[in-house]
Every structure is written in structure tokens, then in C-alpha cells.
């Protein structure tokens, strides 16, 4: 049997913040505003996995009111989620995700992101598919004010 879950996240972009996507720091003059490192891709994947497992959402497990998570790498969220799945004998079959940002170009960094995400989740990079979109200059993302990600995760029970 399989179970699926979806995840979505968006962070505002601000100057003077590091841009970390999928656990990889990208050279850019702006980065996400957030309690953790604001990694939209890691957050969307985390929510997709928790959803597929029936375990609620990222805010329940890693509340931004908890100083423990301030400034931490979001890969820690994925490592913790991996433990929750393991305890329930849920195995990650596949993850597919879209990151939406006007800039910078993400494609060249996908191999490093898949590697970092796969390591945190204990799966092969081949089990993670990443896609990049711009917002065609429309809306907050199109104006470069925000970055967003959508993810879907499939678990084997
Ligand atoms: Mg987030």
C-alpha cells in the first residue's frame, strides 16, 4: 500500500539573508526571512512527508516559538521526520517538488540539493525529483519578494 502527502511553503526574501534551498547555500543577494534557515524546499518536503504519514504538519513538530529551532538547518527537520517515519515502518518511495523563484537559476544546483536532501532522509538522490519555475514576473514571487515550493511525497507502508 502507498500513502501520499502534499506540502507547500513560502518565505519572504530579504537582503542580508543567506539563500538556502534544499540544504544548499546559493550565491544570491537575498535570502528567506524565517525562524530557521527558511529553506522552502526542505519545509515543503517535510510537510509532504508528515502529511503522507498522517502526522500533522511542520508547525506542530517544529514550532517557530521554540528557540531550539532558531537559525537551525532545516535538514534537521528532515532528519527528525525520517525518524518518525522509521518508527512507524513507513518507507519513502519518492519525492517530487517544484521550487518557484524568479532568481537565481536553480537547475545547476539540483544535483547538490538532491544529494543533501537524500542524505538527510536516508534515501537515494534518484528518489528525489526537483523542478524549477519562475512566476513569469507576476505577483510577489515574480517581483523577487518571495520564494515558494510545492512537494509531494509517496510512502510505502
Ligand atoms: Mg517555512
Image (tube, helix red, strand yellow):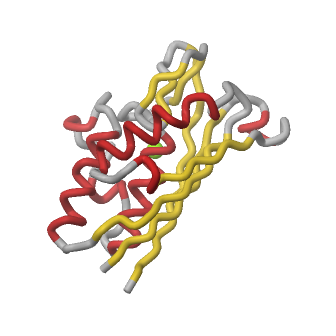
Left or right: 117 in relation to 70: right
Image quarter of residue 27: top right
Viewport quadrant of the C terminus: bottom left
The residue shown at (42%, 59%) is 47
The structure residue drawn at horizontal position 46% and vertical position 70%, both measured from the top left corner, is 5
Viewer-nearest residue: 35 or 40: 40
Percent from the top left, x then y, of residue 92? 35, 65
Q: For this view, does 153 lie left or right of residue 129?
A: left
Residue ID at (46%, 36%):
113
Q: In the picture shown, does residue 90 fall above or below 95? A: below
Which residue lies at the image location 45% right of the left edge and 35% below the top edge? 38
The x and y percentages for residue 141 are 72, 38
Name the image quarter holding residue 3: bottom left
Give the side of residue 17 with respect to residue 120, left or right: right
**In front of the other: 84 or 62:** 84
Outermost residue toward the bottom in this view: 1
In front of the other: 73 or 15? 73
Note whether 112 is above or below 95 in the view shown: above
In this rendering, the count of numbered labels is 0
Expressed as whole percent of the image width and height from the top left, the position of residue 52 reads 40, 72
66 versus 27 height, above or below: below
- In percent of width and height, residue 140 lies at 73, 38
Extreme residue in the left direction: 87
Of the pair 114 and 151, the residue shown nearer to us? 114
Quadrant for the N terminus, please: bottom left
Q: Is residue 77 left or right of residue 134?
A: left
Amino acid at each position: 500500500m502507498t500513502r501520499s502527502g502534499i506540502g507547500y511553503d513560502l518565505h519572504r526574501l530579504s537582503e542580508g539573508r543567506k539563500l538556502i534551498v534544499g540544504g544548499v547555500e546559493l550565491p544570491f543577494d537575498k535570502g528567506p526571512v524565517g525562524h530557521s534557515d527558511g529553506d522552502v524546499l526542505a519545509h515543503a518536503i517535510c510537510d509532504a512527508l508528515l502529511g503522507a504519514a498522517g502526522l500533522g504538519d511542520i508547525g506542530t513538530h517544529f514550532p517557530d516559538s521554540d528557540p531550539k529551532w532558531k537559525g537551525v538547518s532545516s535538514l534537521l527537520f528532515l532528519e527528525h521526520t525520517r525518524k518518525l517515519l522509521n518508527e512507524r515502518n513507513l518507507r519513502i518511495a519518492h519525492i517530487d517538488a517544484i521550487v518557484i523563484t524568479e532568481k537565481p537559476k536553480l537547475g545547476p544546483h539540483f544535483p547538490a540539493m538532491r544529494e543533501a536532501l537524500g542524505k538527510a532522509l536516508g534515501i537515494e538522490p534518484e528518489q528525489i525529483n526537483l523542478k524549477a519555475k519562475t512566476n513569469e514576473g507576476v505577483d510577489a514571487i515574480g517581483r523577487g519578494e518571495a520564494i515558494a515550493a510545492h512537494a509531494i511525497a509517496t510512502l510505502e507502508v
